[in-house]
Amino acid sequence: MIKKADLASALRNNAQAIANANSYNLIVDGREYKPSSTEEYTTEHTLFGDDNKIGMEDGSNDFQIGIYQLTVNVPRNKSNLRALDIVDTFTLGFVRGTELTVNGQMVRMMESSVTALNYNQTHLMYAISIKYSVIH
């Protein structure tokens, strides 16, 4: 069985380490947050995939492919290039082949993609979708 708490922790720990090293504000999944219009911040969401058996036997390992999403938000009075700098920093921390482990649960990064620029009344936004795989 894939332990979703360990999987989410591995991804979050890596994102938090990147955020801390660069003085970024990471808002963790499920935390209520009301940003000011002048504040940069990034939100995280783990989109778990289905657990699939690798073999036919009852004791076979499970395999999952899912997406870890980080949404970078910068104030509209800043350039979208500032947002892309933050996107690049996070993406470098989740490059293909990166392996993260918590309590024996290993998560491997497969690929990442970035959406087109979105915006609301106060912020410019790019979403990074990081595809991961996990076997347990």
Image (spheres, rainbow, N blue to C red):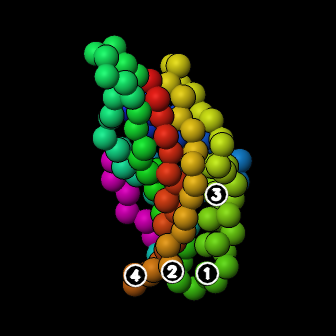
Give the Cα separation between the discs numbered 3 and 2. 16 Å
Q: Are marks 3 and 1 in contact (CB under 8 Å)?
A: no
Give the Cα separation between the discs numbered 3 and 4. 23 Å
20 sits left or right of 30 in the view: right
Label 3 element class: helix
Percent of width and height locating residue 40: 56, 67
In front: label 3 or label 4 = 3
Residue at image mark 4: 120
Q: Are marks 2 and 1 in contact (CB under 8 Å)?
A: yes
The reply to whether residue 115 is visible in this rendering is yes
Q: Earlier in the sequence, mark 1 or mark 4?
A: 1
Q: Amino acid at mark 2?
A: Leu
Frontmost residue, 71 versus 54: 54
Q: Earlier in the sequence, mark 3 or mark 4?
A: 3
Q: Amino acid at mark 3?
A: Thr
The reply to whether residue 2 is visible in this rendering is no
Percent of width and height locating residue 105: 50, 25
Percent of width and height locating residue 34: 37, 63
Percent of width and height locating residue 38: 53, 74
Q: Earlier in the sequence, mark 3 or mark 2?
A: 3
Residue at image mark 1: 80
Q: Which mark is residue 117?
A: 2
Residue at image mark 3: 91
Quadrant (top left, top right, bottom left, bottom right) of the C terminus: top left
**Crowdedness of circle 4 by 10 Å Cα count: few (<14), some, many (20+)?**
few
Quadrant (top left, top right, bottom left, bottom right) of the N terminus: top left
